[in-house]
Image (cartoon, rainbow, N blue to C red):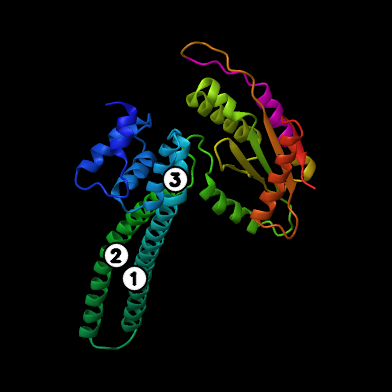
Amino acid sequence: MTTSEMESSATPMNAAVRGDDVAFRVIDFLFAHCLSTTPVHYAVVHAYFDGKHQEISAAIDGQLAAGKPLDAFFVAELYEEHLAAEAIRRYRGVGTDVERLLDGLMESLRTADQGSSEYQASLQENIGSIGRSNDALHIKQVAKSLLESALKASETNAVLKKNLETADQEARQLRGELERHRRETMTDPLTGLLNRRGMEVEMARVLSEDAEGGASMMVLDIDHFKRINDTYGHAVGDVVIRKVAQTVKRLIPGSAVPVRYGGEEFAVLLPQCSTEQARGIAETIRDTVEKLRLVRRHDKMAISQFTISIGVAKRGLRDDMESLFQRADKALYEAKTGGRNRVMLAA
């Protein structure tokens, strides 16, 4: 079966594929379009066939009808736009419920442990008081019996306390696992940077702590990236994107928030960073990328030099994430129209 025939037979045409056949058709579809069987790719293509996600079906059908390739970035964008938000809500909801349950359980156990200790101390004090009085002997015996019961309760509680520590460790592991899943839904699989969903969450969080407007933003774009894909293929294009992402991540401060928000487009939020500091970081990144030299592994072909353009904007007191991004993006546009391979500052 040819690729075109595979595309034709795999297209849902607004009808859901039913039964166990879905899994096999998903795999066939991924292979036909040279897509790896990663969870993100599988989830999107499965949604394409199950008939419950009309937006995904329409987007893929439109891409195929236009004769455009279904590359990893296109599929990742569909996942971020239509499936990632649902995953984030699910993991957040589960995490919150589990944390509330475990926190309540552990607090109850701690209270029980404290109450038992106080009960034992109270009994000891009362027995001492009885011993100094002229009360009947059998009262002391009763009190002694009560103390023994309290000691047994304390021993039982020691086991309970140990179980509490184990539960606490398991809770920490569970929270870590939930956080890992949450991060995956906000991470670009190609570069390891945040995706657009992560950009909305993390940049909003950082800017909420930036009361004095001390942050800056860089928006950067690989120059003539389509030419790279057309000349060397999408596999080399992906390598170029990864190299640029690695360079950006290596040269920005640890507090910065780097994002891949489009195919060859990146953004970086720089907390507590002046205009001159941001421009210096941007120039270092631009210069480093310009000096990169890549060689295609299988045939040792040297990839032509590539460059990036960068727009930089300093946050004003009235800027939210969207307006700050728009000003940096406008500066990027000016860098592009001004000749590329340069850094431009927003007005």
The quarter of the picture where the N terminus appears is: top left
Residue 11 appears left or right of 256: left
State yes or no: discs 1 and 2 in contact (Cβ < 8 Å): yes
Between marks 1 and 2, how big is the CA–CA gap? 8 Å
Q: Nearer the viewer, residue 124 or 197?
A: 197
Please tell me whether mark 1 or mark 3 is closer to you in this view.
Answer: 3
Query: Which numbered disc flags the more N-terminal residue, 2 or 3?
Result: 3
Magenta region: 280-297
Q: Residues within 10 Å of mark 1 (few under 14, many from 20)?
A: some
Comes first in the chain, label 1 or label 3 = 3
Q: Position of residue 166 (x, y in %)?
A: 33, 54
Give the image location of residue 174, x and y in percent: 37, 52
Residue visible at 40% across and 61% down in the picture: 93
Query: Does residue 299 lie above or below 260 as drawn?
Result: above
Q: Which residue is at the far front? A: 65
> Looking at the picture, which amino acid does disc 3 mark?
Leu
Circle 3: element type? helix
Residue depicted at 29% across the width and 62% down the height:
160
Residue 287 magenta-highlighted: yes
Q: For mark 1, what is the residue?
A: 112
Q: Nearer the viewer, mark 2 or mark 3?
A: 3
Q: Nearer the viewer, residue 120 or 46?
A: 46
Q: Position of residue 325 (x, y in %)?
A: 66, 49
Taking the image as shown, residue 281 lies to the left or right of residue 46, namely right
User: What numbered label is drawn on residue 78?
Assistant: 3
- Residue 184 visible at all: no
Q: Which residue is mark 2?
A: 157
Q: What's the residue at 69%, 34% (across, down)?
A: 309
Indicate the secondary structure of the residue bearing disc 1.
helix
Q: Amino acid at mark 2?
A: Asn
Name the chief secondary structure element in magenta. Answer: helix
